[in-house]
Amino acid sequence: MEWETVIGLEIHAQLATRSKIFSGAATAYGAPPNAQTDLIDLAYPGVLPVLNGEAVRMAVKFGLAINARVMRRSIFARKNYFYPDLPKGYQISQFELPIVCGGAVDIVLEDGSSKRIEVTRAHLEEDAGKSLHEGLAGLTGVDLNRAGTPLIEIVSEPQMRSAREAVAYLKKVHTLVRYLAICDGNMQEGSFRCDANVSVRVKGTEKFGTRAEIKNLNSFRFVEKAINYEVARQIELLEGGGKVVQETRLYDSDRGETRSMRSKEEANDYRYFPDPDLLPLEIDQVYIDTVAATLPELPDQKAQRFIQEYGLSAYDAGVLTASAEFADYYEVVVRDLGGHPKLAANTVTGELAGLLNRDGLGIADIRVDAHSLAALLARVADNTISGKIAKDVLEVMWDEGAQADAIIEARGLRQITDSSAIERAIEAMMAANPGQLADYRAGKEKLFGFFVGQVMKATAGKANPAQLNELLKKKLGG
Amino acid sequence: MTALHELTVAELSKALRTRTVSSIELVLACLARIELHQQGLNAFISILREEALAEAARADARLAAGEEGAVIGVPIAHKDIFCTRGQKTTCGSRMLANFVSPYDATVVERLRAAGAVMVGKTNMDEFAMGSSNETSYFGPVRNPWDLARVPGGSSGGSAAAVAARLTPAATATDTGGSIRQPAALCGVTGLKPTYGRVSRFGMIAFASSLDQGGLITRSAEDSALLLRTMAGFDERDSTSVQLPVPDYCATLEQPLKGLKIGLLKEFFDEGLDPDSAQRIRDALEVLREQGATLKEVSLPNLPLSVPTYYVVAPAECSSNLARFDGVRYGYRCENPRDLLDLYQRSRGEGFGAEVKRRIMTGTYVLSAGYYDAYYLKAQRVRALISADFERAFHDIDVLIGPTTPTPAFEIGAKTADPVTMYLNDIYTIGANLAGLPAISVPCGLVRGLPVGLQIIGPHFSESRLFNVAHRYQLETDWHRRAPPGFA
Amino acid sequence: MSLNRQDIGKIALLARLALTESEVPAYVENLSRIMDLVGELERADTSQVEPMAHPLPGQRQRLRADEVTASDQHELFQRNAPQVEAGLYLVPRVIE
């Protein structure tokens, strides 16, 4: 039996407004419990919601960025249910008429191919508070600081066919919302999270299988693991003659499995109806055009430009444009260098990214600024040092904060480009390794690499690799 | 020399500004009468003696300093549905019996800033749900005209307090008739403004698309004076309308010549008590003598207002009252076993039967499978009713008819069947559904009990309503009659 | 439109209202009566008209500037709370 996986994602991104969607309380993360709640967030008797214009602007920005229809008229609706982190006993959301309809996100898969994932809709709603269970003597503590933070809920069509595709889509949307500066994308803090709707069906069938919803996944890794686990679980269940139950599940990262949520109650009947305290949201073309004019160069556009302008591969362009800051950094380096885009790309996506990773830093805390990196790469470009030596210099620049030229001088790292000096080193090496020389001449071609390595060792890595290669070939050929 | 409690707000305003009387004197007089009649009428839930005297002193200081505001020093009672900072705001319910509000409703804030002195919070049907003030957790209010009868509801306390001359004015709210109906049953003037005219911020919500804050006074002139202060755009209420507030007093005296009055055919039905019908006709005669013309109009969908209302209002209230869960404020049950028990018993014990009935009705009509058939259907019928009104107003300036089908009924007479109680609102609900302003003024007595005349106008026509009512009140003295024993 | 005990039970649960056994028959009867009243709506021909959610025509939602206007008043607000600890509102344990 060949199975096909069907995945749809519902992403909840917190919009980076200063104040909440319906009240003037602050949205900053990390405040003491309930320090950022005003009467409206606490659902006191008699209070009323007033809509934050910035949240609307951000939602429209998103809609435009994914080429969706920005709806001229959208309605806020109440989603009614009881839970301690939902103070009004209803969440203000959008149901029948959301602010954004349609749209699509293009993802690049590992094999380099591209796939378009369509978006069903995106709408505005308010976040709920948080429940804490630790150390409260068997009770639950409710912190409503998060209640009322604006969210945009982005619903994809069920067009992803593997966990990898789902992660690619998630990462793309993550990049997009940060490019648009509408969400900080901080998954640990919960500003960007997703629910995955997962089902399987026999390959070739049209009908969708019953799906399970895995809620509140807040890391790319967990998304991938949870989906894979769930797919395996469902297949095993179905192959054993069982049925998949439509339910909500949670991912237990410690155990690496999904679990059915202890049902809070039977299937929730949310009794959606238009919120009478809020009037229809009407947006005209002038407003949309004003917002459109503020759109930055989007990731896909930037990647395309990098491919064309800098002659980079789609893969490299993709890596560099994963964040606007990263891409900007790269462009400053290339500009300073006055060329050598491939060299810059390799270093930025390779060694530099490696150092960021090693120290667990984000681009904002980078230890070598773009100008300094460009200065280092200039020394590679003009053959002062080899690429390999440059790697070491970069690490010193990173750890000690020094500049390239100073390090090269202090450590005497200039490349040896004098042909006769290299020839002499080659001759010395050949004399010292008669056995290998004989083997090489007898046909063991792999030893070429060994010879290169030996000369490099003898010259403390400073022999110009290209020259060394050429001269070595000549000498060995003879 | 007229007793202080006989003076209208307009008269008090003048007396205060000419320093003929002080606010302290007035407030002391009010408090004395309030305390004297509290047991008999039960019109108040909170009597704010100290605070009122302190505010009165401040008002007197402002007057002494030469301030000219029309409302400075005037005593006023607030229906206990308006949040008042630092004071209990109970909404007539056990659920909020000890709730002290940390903020003022906009209405309260504006009247306070204008110098009005709050003497107390008036009794009301629980969460504004009722037409007789019999559902209050704090006991029923009695009609000063006959203590065995209801004052009407839900603003029964405000109406009784004004009728008994305990306070010259009181704020109130109207969702299906809760200002006009008690005003009619108590022989006083009750105004429901256009939806969006008065801010709902701080006015505990019952049915958000129907609720409106207004006034109960002894004359249209008083209402005009006070509405000026209460009304106007509030940025804290998204449904608040950005229209300037006219000087309602400036147009009170305009002659009625040429006024086109529509008589609502559907209102003069078999449900209307014949003697009350006669009073209405007498009142219409008075207006005709002033130059108005009468024309019969039909609003064919109007008879469906009660069923429409009893879908829309419960639906909205079932959602609005979900916040009362024993978690952040309000009543909490003892020793909840678990979360479900906390919710169910806090709400089950905290709310009275009528409130629970409406929450359940609302939950039902919104539930899966019923939403289209009930909620959407009702909102469509609402559109039909609104369209009927709009069409009628093409040819006429105001609609006039009775406020209630009968005068005040006996306490306990209608509590057996909720639907019987609901039918009391039959003439008032239409204006709420369409968001129209409407005023009820006393127009006679039937078997010793007051009858109310209702005047409904197009959106934002309060000036016109006040004008018609005021001209009527210049020619008649029903609004000056006090209940026996309260003169 | 008649409702039965089961309907009442379901509605009461959705609405989080505890009903005692003795209360149920009254609710069954009263709600059935109310729904009879509501049934009259079927008489109206509403095929040509849209549902009206707001009483005034042509109103649109106003937008608010994105400013923080609230300060930390949780101590004042929590004076009304039945059970609070370390700034948190307490409820019986919620199991997820």
Image: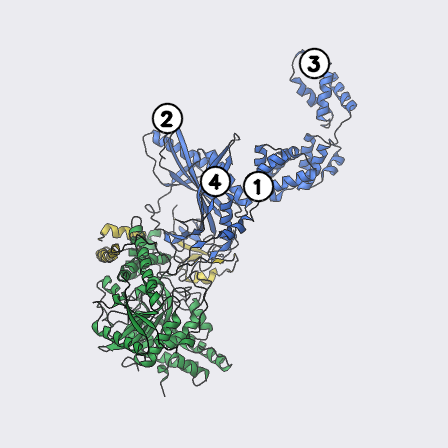
Q: Residue at x 34, y 80 (%)?
A: B474
From the viewer's perspective, is residue B383 above or below residue B482? above
Cα separation between marks 3 and 1: 53 Å
Q: What amino acid type is highlighted by mark number 1? A: Ser
Residue topped by disc 1: A323
> What SS does tag 1 mark?
loop
Residue topped by disc 4: A104
Q: In which quarter of the image is residue C24?
A: bottom left
Cα separation between marks 1 and 4: 19 Å
Which is more toward the observer, B429 or A396?
A: B429
Q: Mark 1 lies on which chain?
A: A
Residue topped by disc 3: A435
User: Which chain did the renderer colour green?
Assistant: B
Closer mark to the observer between disc 1 and disc 4: 4
Closer mark to the observer between disc 4 and disc 3: 4
Q: What amino acid type is highlighted by mark number 2? A: Met
Residue topped by disc 2: A1
From the viewer's perspective, is residue B56 above or below residue A352? below
Same chain letter for marks 1 and 2:
yes
